[in-house]
Amino acid sequence: DSGVTQTPKHLITATGQRVTLRCSPRSGDLSVYWYQQSLDQGLQFLIQYYNGEERAKGNILERFSAQQFPDLHSELNLSSLELGDSALYFCASSGGGQIPWGFYNEQFFGPGTRLTVL
Amino acid sequence: AQTVTQSQPEMSVQEAETVTLSCTYDTSESNYYLFWYKQPPSRQMILVIRQEAYKQQNATENRFSVNFQKAAKSFSLKISDSQLGDTAMYFCAFTKTGANSKLTFGKGITLSVRP
């Protein structure tokens, strides 16, 4: 158990709909990352939040948005869903903040949310 | 931008034998980390091993070891004494150092361990 929780585990919805995926990071972690795993695109970084602020953006569609709340949990909102949005969405968390040069804050992955768009 | 390439989509190995999974990467960064992640059928992402680019010594974790060739930008994973539980998808990943840095993944390789 990584300590990162994601809800729901599975989500089935129709094209054109909007869904919200939720992530609770490990206790004390300030950074939250969202990744998408699909058959054709593989594992891709979507977006990162650090202590409530957007820190980095990857291949995130304009129909997708995210936020991190004061309690540090994060939500990924997917709207106007298309068949191609069907994927496994992972959240990962890490400590963030100032660390010594050359070091890295390990990311801990949640179990993922399986989204199926019909 | 960084890229990670895993050119072998699938591999198979007999139980108790050794298998090597290949990965190459491209970056202009001088300091970075490389990882191998395992994704079993449960879909959980499990960190297998990591290598700091500034360390010359190859990382080892029990039956798992890497061959890190910095000049060639190559990072292969060797699994010794393969077990049925090693059957999974394996991803090579890269990140820059620093407090907040995304992971860049390869396409992954499906490893099957035969009894």
Image (cartoon, coloured by chain):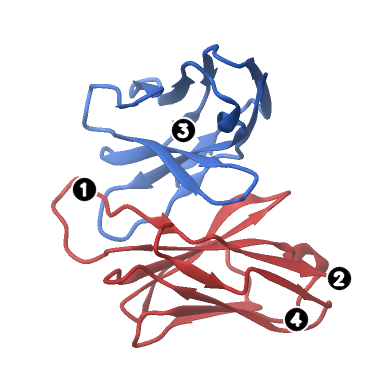
Chain colours: A red, B blue
Chain letter of the residue carrying label 2:
A
Mark 2 or 1, nearer chain start: 1
In the rendered image, residue A65, in percent from the top left (x then y), is placed at 56, 79
**Cα–Cα span, label 4 and label 3:** 35 Å
**Cα–Cα span, label 4 and label 1:** 40 Å
Q: Secondary structure at mark 3?
A: strand
Quadrant of the image containing the C terminus of chain A: bottom right
The residue labelled by disc 3 is B25
* Residue A103: mark: 1
Look at the numbered discs 4 and 3 and tell me whether their residues touch, using CB distance below 8 Å: no
Q: Both on one chain, marks 2 and 3? A: no
In the rendered image, residue B16, in percent from the top left (x then y), is placed at 54, 14
Q: Secondary structure at mark 2?
A: loop
The type of residue carrying mark 4 is Ser
The residue labelled by disc 4 is A80
Q: Is the residue A39 above or below the residue B25 in the image?
A: below
In the rendered image, residue A111, in percent from the top left (x then y), is placed at 54, 60
The residue labelled by disc 2 is A118
At x 63%, y 17%, the residue is: B13
Chain letter of the residue carrying label 1:
A
In the rendered image, residue B51, in percent from the top left (x then y), is placed at 31, 33
Q: Is the residue B112 above or below the residue B1 in the image?
A: above
**Cα–Cα span, label 2 and label 4:** 12 Å
Q: Both on one chain, marks 2 and 1? A: yes
At x 40%, y 86%, the residue is: A69
Look at the numbered discs 2 and 3 and tell me whether their residues touch, using CB distance below 8 Å: no
Q: Work out which residue is located at the far bottom of the displayed protein and give it.
A: A70
**Cα–Cα span, label 2 and label 3:** 36 Å
The type of residue carrying mark 2 is Leu
